[in-house]
Image (cartoon, grey):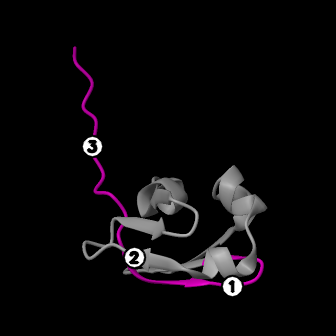
Amino acid sequence: MGTVTKERKPVLALSIEAQVDGLVIITSEKRHFVAWNNCSPKLARATHEERSQLELSPSGYGIHWRLLDEDLSVDGLVGGEQAGK
């Protein structure tokens, strides 16, 4: 007998904010906080100025740091928190 898996939709951000100690991501479900060292090694080593230069993609799917040439998906950062919902 086959297993039925329920595919979850990717988590999308409505807004983002760089703070000194981490990244705030607002989704339709809740406010998430991700410490910089949990984002990526590049962001963990970056200065606050470099981290503050971020852009949310128009779709809400990704975040881009142009000074660092770093791109991360919102789902990759907070999707695991909502996987059980």
**Neighbourhood count class around disc 3 (C-alpha, 10 Å): few under 14, some 14–19, many 20 upward:** few
Q: Nearer the viewer, residue 46 or 16?
A: 46
Mark 1 — residue?
19
Mark 2 — residue?
56
Instruction: Determine the residue positioned at 43% across, 77% down.
Output: 55
| Span of residues in magenta | 1-23
Location of residue 38 in the rendering, given as x and y in whole percent from the top left corner: 70, 57
Amino acid type assigned to the residue bearing label 3 in the image? Lys
Amino acid type assigned to the residue bearing label 1 in the image? Gln
Give the CA distance from mark 1 to mark 3. Answer: 35 Å
Residue extending farthest to the front is 67
Q: Quadrant of the N terminus?
A: top left
Give the CA distance from mark 2 to mark 3. Answer: 28 Å
Q: Secondary structure at mark 3?
A: loop
Residue 85 makes an appearance in the image: no
Q: Which mark is residue 67?
A: none
Q: Nearer the viewer, mark 2 or mark 3?
A: 2
First in sequence: mark 2 or mark 1? 1
